[in-house]
Amino acid sequence: MDERLNGNDVYIAFNGPTGGDPYVAQSHDAGATWTQTKIVDSKRYIYAFDGDVLTNGTVVFSETSLLYANTSTLTGQDLVYVYRSTNVGATWSTNLVDTVEIGPNCTAAGCPNDYYPGHSAVSADANGNLVLLYDGATVSQGNESIWTRRSTDGGATWSGRQALSTSGEMGDFPSVESRGAGDVRAWYMQTNGGNFDAWNTWYRSSTDGGVTWTAPVKISDVTSGASYKTANGFLEPYGDYGETAITSAGKTIATWGEGNSYTGPGGVWFNRQT
């Protein structure tokens, strides 16, 4: 969900109500009344993840499109989209930003095959420039990387992709937030030494709108206190709903889930910049 600066125009992206077609619910009276718009009809399942509203009122949502061979098995590739409106939600354009390969199946207890692929996040800075993060592999069933792209024209066109995660590791579940001109903060999860039972959450930031990034900092730095935490990392990402926020003092707060497996038990963890 996101809203315009005046607080009256509110937008919520969701999947469904049947299948995975992308919808946007919108209100232009601060939530008193709502309308719903289906953006496209598709045989693919299109997952709504993140959105933002630029200072000029342009609305963007980052969503990923997966094709199912059956209820839990994916086929084909992961299509990374940005849906965009420049007229207060009256019409929407479909922008294919990238096509990536489907990564490995999740083998943790209770975990479906489609857990690791298909996550994205997008944020606009004070100048209306966008940074998009998403996960995806370069070869089918290969380890996914966290990729980032930039847009300086409100999402109409995008830069080439660059990797934020470490080559050879599995990177997943990105989150991003912006503040000020060019100030971007992001985190993602990554395996440790290729071990799918040892994950950590890493933080990187940029002061030039995502052109360059700081070195990774491990923010899941508590190594005990729960059955799923070790010195090498936590056993499994527990849900794909983490978030990033920036306080009025300019400090970053990150939240994410860690667990024994997809089934759990697990917990929500956070770290905050001091």
Image (cartoon, rainbow, N blue to C red):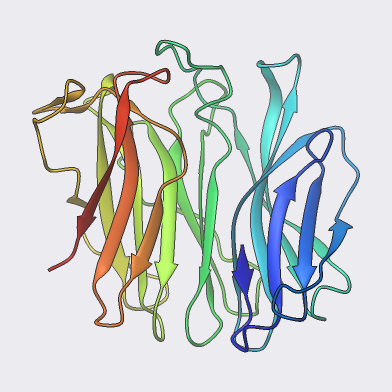
Viewer-closest of 109 and 62: 109
Residue 108: x %, y % from top left: 40, 13
Q: Residue at x 66, y 50 (%)?
A: 63
Viewer-closest of 208 and 112: 112
Viewer-closest of 30 and 19: 30
* In the depicted structure, whether residue 31 falls above or below residue 263: below
- Residue 213 visible in the picture: no
- Residue 159 visible in the picture: yes
Q: Which residue is drawn at 36% across and 66% down?
A: 245
* In the depicted structure, whether residue 165 falls above or below residue 215: above
Q: Residue at x 87, y 59 (%)?
A: 37
Q: In which quarter of the image is residue 235?
A: top left
Quadrant (top left, top right, bottom left, bottom right) of the N terminus = bottom right
Residue 199: x %, y % from top left: 26, 30
Q: Quadrant of residue 244?
A: bottom left
Residue 213: x %, y % from top left: 30, 65
Residue 269: x %, y % from top left: 26, 44
Q: How many marks overall?
A: 0
Viewer-closest of 229 and 81: 229
* In the depicted structure, whether residue 236 falls above or below residue 70: below
Q: In this view, does 250 lie to the left or right of 136?
A: left
Q: In which quarter of the image is residue 267?
A: top left
Q: In this view, does 210 lie to the left or right of 161?
A: left
Q: Residue at x 57, y 23 (%)?
A: 140
Q: Which residue lies furthest to the front in this view?
A: 32
Q: Is residue 33 left or right of residue 82?
A: right
Q: Is residue 26 left or right of residue 126?
A: right
Quadrant (top left, top right, bottom left, bottom right) of the C terminus = bottom left
